[in-house]
Image (spheres, rainbow, N blue to C red):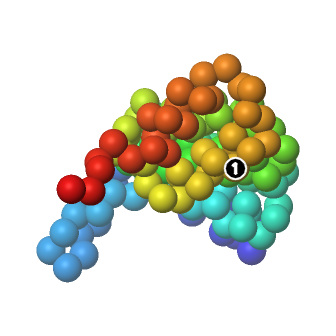
Amino acid sequence: MTSGPRPTRQLPASPVTPYTAGRPRELTAGQCALYRIGIHRHLGDLDTAHARRLRRLRPEYLPTAERRARAATDTARALLDAGEAAGAFAQLRLVELAAPLEARRPSVRALTLRVVERRPGLPGLSDYAHRTVVSPIRPA
């Protein structure tokens, strides 16, 4: 797999728009780096996930707020898996800043609860958890 990253280096930082089934899709080197971070995290290779994050991922080049939120979410997961709850919480704040509704997704809520369990006294964490984990929509 040594040849894998090479083609992504040839992608421009700004999106390329291939068309499939009549819909445009944007592909950037940043999106490929984001995908690689998730793969390395799932494989348990946290050092590689962190290295990829620091070297390649530039959230400002991701085409949508949701993609930027996903980048912060994946980084938060990797940091929490590495025992860095404070760093994970900082990334969760970026999720909310990039795309507030993404912070309320079930998987991100679960991640927030994991941070609360590990470091309940982090400044701002309680307020963040109340904003994002407790649903503002109440059944009638």
- Element at label 1: helix
In the rendered image of this protein, does residue 91 appear above or below residue 24? above
Q: Is residue 130 left or right of residue 77?
A: left
Q: What residue lies at 70% left-to-right and 49% top-to-bottom?
A: 114
In the rendered image of this protein, does residue 44 appear above or below residue 71? below
Q: What residue lies at 67% left-to-right and 20% top-to-bottom?
A: 123
* Quarter location, residue 4: bottom right
Q: Specify whether residue 86 is in view.
A: yes
Report the residue that reaches farthest toward the bottom.
21
Q: Which one is in front, 107 or 32?
A: 107
Q: Please, what is the three-letter code of the amino acid marked with disc 1? A: Arg
> Label 1, on which residue?
114
Q: What residue lies at 56% left-to-right and 48% top-to-bottom?
A: 73
Q: Percent x, y for residue 1? A: 74, 74
Q: What residue lies at 20% left-to-right and 79% top-to-bottom?
A: 21
Report the residue that reaches farthest toward the left.
22
* Quarter location, residue 62: top left
